[in-house]
Image (cartoon, rainbow, N blue to C red):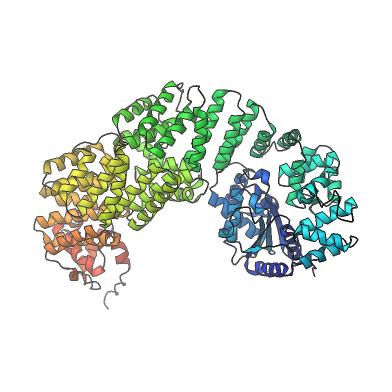
Amino acid sequence: MDFDPTGLVGRDRELGELAMFLDKAASDGATVLLTGEPGVGKTALLDTTAELALAKGTRVVRGSGVEYETDISFAGLHQLVAALPYELGRLPPSMREALEVALGLGVGPAPSRITVLNAALSLFEEAAKEQPLLLVVDDLHVVDHASRSVVGFVARRLGGRRIGLIGAQRAESGEPLRATGLTEVEIGPLNDADALRLLSRRFAHLPPRVLSTVAREAQGNPLALLEFAGSTSVSGDRNGSGAGWASGPGRDVRALYGARVERLPQRTRDLLLLAVLEGSGDIGVLEVAGGPDGLGSLAPAERDHLVMVAENGRTVRFRHPLVRSAVVDGSTGEQRRSAHRRLADALADQPERRGDHLARATTVPDEAVAAVIESAARSSLRRGDADGAVVRMRRAAELSPDRADRRRRMSQAAYIAVWITGHLETSHEIMREVRGDPAARSLSAAAAAGYLVLVTEGDADTAHALLMKAIEQAPAPSGPPHGELETALFTLTIVSEFSGRREHWQPLVDVLARFPEASPAAAMSLGRIHHDLGSVTDDTLRRLDEEISRLKGRTDADVVVRTALAASYFDRLPGCREAVSRVIRDGGAVGASMPALVFAALDDLYAGRLQASADAAAELIALCEETGYHLFAQGGHYVAAMAAAQRGDLDACHEHCGNLRDWSGPRRLRRLENHAHQALARAALGAADFETAYRHATAICAPGTLPPFNHEAVLSAPDLVEAAVGSGRHTEALRHADAIRDAGVGRLSSRLALCAATITAMTSAPEAMAERFEEALALPGIEQWPFEAGRAHLAYGERLRRQGLNRDARTQLTAARGLFEELGARPWEDRAAAELRATGMTRTSRGKAGEALTPQELEVARLAATGLSNPRIASRLFLSPRTVSSHLYRVFPKLGITSRAELRDALEALPPEPPAGL
């Protein structure tokens, strides 16, 4: 089928480029972005490209930005998805539900932004299975932010797919879209010859002098050329002087469209206004909102070529964006409000869109309307549109007749802005307005103000005072706290955690004592965890594991961050990693992404991925500096300091610790001060500077004590005990080991179990030492914690060497050196190597790899690979534990490994034994 793009004059170059674009898109995917001033012909080129695509057998799906919907997330995507109902139904349920929830067409857990982006791409791939697909998006400069992110995401991933994406935006819009991957084509004005040729073709009846004047005044803008000349033709002024195009507002194309709209019947103008404000061009909605026989009123606008109805009869599209502007400009405020009310009635089954129209239709406080808009805001939050939730909640507050409701809604908008979206200035702006209200402060206001002052200024005193006053004045609930009270208690818990001072955490503990047990991620549970880690019950751990398992289907940033916070105290961050990563990648949750980055960095640190943890810490620090969330930057400095301490980069460690102490010291944030002491103690231990390490470790807590609201007292316990032993303070070391054992923290996670068992072994009597270390190294799951395992091997080897058991010591020290080498923990590797040299072993002794194992060595290795300790292996084989250790000492270098954790894989890699008798 041939296609002749008649009517486009002077666009041969552009049409040639667009034809090549379509050919490439149909075979391998392609993108193009048309830019230029209003009226230069971008929409005409989009239309022509769409017609050419249809002629080539390509399916076309169109959408357009609407300036009245720029604050409605995914409004633009809604238009594209609505055109593909069959393909939407063929998507996997998880993807279909993500799109339906994001677009307000369904209910369910809020999908993350990345989930929606991937689902949209999959939908377009599905649509392109049977024939190539062209996505056409006009007016990108007024497409909502969320939909623009879809455009960019899809554009960057079209290679190898039979999908084309073409968009258009105004050159002066200030919205840079080059980074989205669209290839830009600038559309300029027509030259003088082409302008005259266009006018002569369309307006042959006008004198050449008039055409020349029109061409000069329109400055090559095709829309202006046609509309100015058309206005002159209609006015009958063939001399070009009069009230037509030549003077006044007639020279404004928008005004000319306004004049054409003004000539339409009132019912037609009313229907056009509904179409503009509805945004998507959905004929079904217009039919309901327009009333009986309403659609018949479109005919005059169709005949005047102001609008077009799609061939399928489902949508109406304006000829040009300026027509929409002219329709709105020609309406009164009351007419617009009336149109919004009718649209709200027509959209009763879509709560967010209904709320948006009610918000625009209402001018005086109305609680019924405010409640609908608040419900729409919560719906937005559930589907991951935090920005939309803030906008809607603020509007709900504006329409609240009761001042208490108004404060509550404004404060909730402020809290969402600071906690999830990361819009500090928006939150400050809202709170300034709330503070201007002389009435008593609400729980929501206290939570928002307290969180703001904590994360930006680190002012725990002010935050605590605000929150405690509001909580004490709030009525006590009959069951577990929820809603505003839960939010306030959660914020108070965070304040008390960073403060670490008794005057802050004791009032919180007293308040929490009034309430029953709640979910592990609730404020009550988090507060109790902070207060006394060892008191956490097995049932709480079981329920926490269940909460973590459900994170796979949860994308609510608030739920993910709270659950990960609880998980971080029990070494369960690996189970949260996928959900935490979604929060980090989701551009709509910048505020929540900062604590999420802390958890990702900690997960990497604990797992021994030191470079990854340092990279995440650097990203966090940069993001906090950019956004003003100074408190979370300290979390980045802590992780960076710990990674540097373990890698032996003492300058970097001291620099990060200096930042921590300089910021937290004047604010008396004890937890951050403890973070600095912990990193400095770890760095000193790597250098075997036990006195310095002891000084920093005991700044966190005194030997033999585990103070409440001091998690670092548990985490740094191995540092304190090792520093005490190394500096000759055996009584203090034993006292602290007893405190850790009595607290029962070893049952909370495999890492804490390994730390507690290592501490016990380090302080055991010489005759029990080997058995205690063997028990520690036989604990299940310790391979997840390579640094802690390396410390246990190192401590074991050191004590064996000091007892003169050099051959046994070498086995442990070799394992320690290998683990630290893999981690890049250079000072700790050097410590192990120094101990090995003291046993008389040199690095070359590891060069026995490839030697065959003796039968007894093979048997010992197999039993060790099952997880049995040396004493248990000895008992089974009727050997001494020392002999077992000696066999393993010889086995490791022969197999080319450095730890028991590698035994199973190494044994499986051995060649099969020859059959007996050969």
Residue 671 point in image, percent of width and height: 30, 39
The number of discs equals 0
Q: Is residue 74 left or right of residue 334?
A: left
Which quadrant of the structure image shows residue 745?
Answer: top left
Residue at (27, 74) in percent of width and height: 916
Asked whether 660 or 548 is in front, the reply is 660
Q: Quadrant of the N terminus?
A: bottom right
Residue at (68, 34) in percent of width and height: 358
Residue at (55, 30) in percent of width and height: 409
Q: Is residue 602 left or right of residue 271?
A: left
Asked whether 746 or 32 is in front, the reply is 32
Residue 22 point in image, percent of width and height: 69, 67
Residue 241 point in image, percent of width and height: 86, 53
Residue 489 point in image, percent of width and height: 42, 30
Asked whether 436 or 375 is in front, the reply is 436
Q: Is residue 120 left or right of residue 476?
A: right
Residue 781 in view (yes/no): no
Q: Quadrant of the C terminus?
A: bottom left
Single out the residue that lies furthest toward the left: 804
Q: Is residue 283 above or below residue 819?
A: above
Residue at (38, 46) in percent of width and height: 633
Q: Is residue 565 left or right of residue 658?
A: right
Residue 125 in view (yes/no): yes
